[in-house]
Amino acid sequence: MKNIFLTGKKYIGKSTLIQNTLSRLNLSVGGYVTERIIKDNDRIYIVKSLYDNSESYLIANVDATDYSREVFIDSFDTGIVSMLERDLKDKDIIVLDELGFFENDSEKFKCKIYELLDSDKIILGTIKDYDCEFLNNIKKRDDVLLIEVTKENREKTLGELVEIISNMSS
């Protein structure tokens, strides 16, 4: 399996686990991380490139008072898709932190994710515990290792991830 996704409750440490895993590996890293910025009643979500940390894309703005959201599909369709295309050519491992429901209406983004999963690249990501066709299709793939992260298994999972990915890349 070359596609590994972490799932689990919010704030359980999935993204930290990915960062700690990458710090123990000698691989060139592409892909992205999703950051949340809280500003008054807004929750602003930004995707930041791991290629060279120079690109970022606003993907959604959620109003915390009524949970209405505005999703910026163009960020997925153009910016993030082209970023991932470059990463597919140039990097050893591609991080997808995270896959969720904001991107559900971007067919171009979803096609690019399927292309990445079908490639020979190592994919390491987080995936929301959410019920939608896109995420369910990824979770049920034969070439996906899905790991549920808990407080009890975080430390053990770090060692396992480093070992699994080291074996894949050698």
Image (cartoon, grey):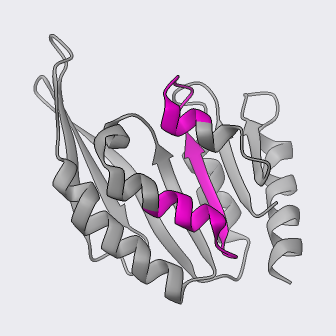
Residue 30 drawn above or below residue 154: below
Horizontal side of 118 relative to 116 (left or right) equals: right
Residue 78 appears in view: yes
* Residue 109 placement: quadrant: bottom left
Residue 28 drawn above or below residue 123: below
Query: What's the residue at 81%, 28% (across, down)?
Result: 152
The one of 68 and 154 positioned closer to us in this rendering = 68
User: Percent x, y for residue 102?
Assistant: 32, 38
Horizontal side of 88 relative to 58 (left or right) equals: right
The one of 100 and 8 positioned closer to us in this rendering = 100
The one of 65 and 3 positioned closer to us in this rendering = 3
Q: Looking at the rendering, in which quadrant would you find the N terminus?
A: bottom right
Residue 13 appears in view: no
Magenta stretch? 112-136
Residue furthest top in the image: 66
Horizontal side of 34 relative to 29 (left or right) equals: left
Figure label count: 0
User: Percent x, y for residue 62?
Assistant: 19, 28
Q: Is residue 116 magenta?
A: yes
Residue 27 drawn above or below residue 148: below
Query: What's the residue at 54%, 66% (across, down)?
Result: 115
User: Percent x, y for residue 133?
Assistant: 51, 32
Query: What's the residue at 72%, 46% (across, down)?
Result: 141
User: Percent x, y for residue 110?
Assistant: 43, 52
Query: What's the residue at 52%, 30% (across, down)?
Result: 11
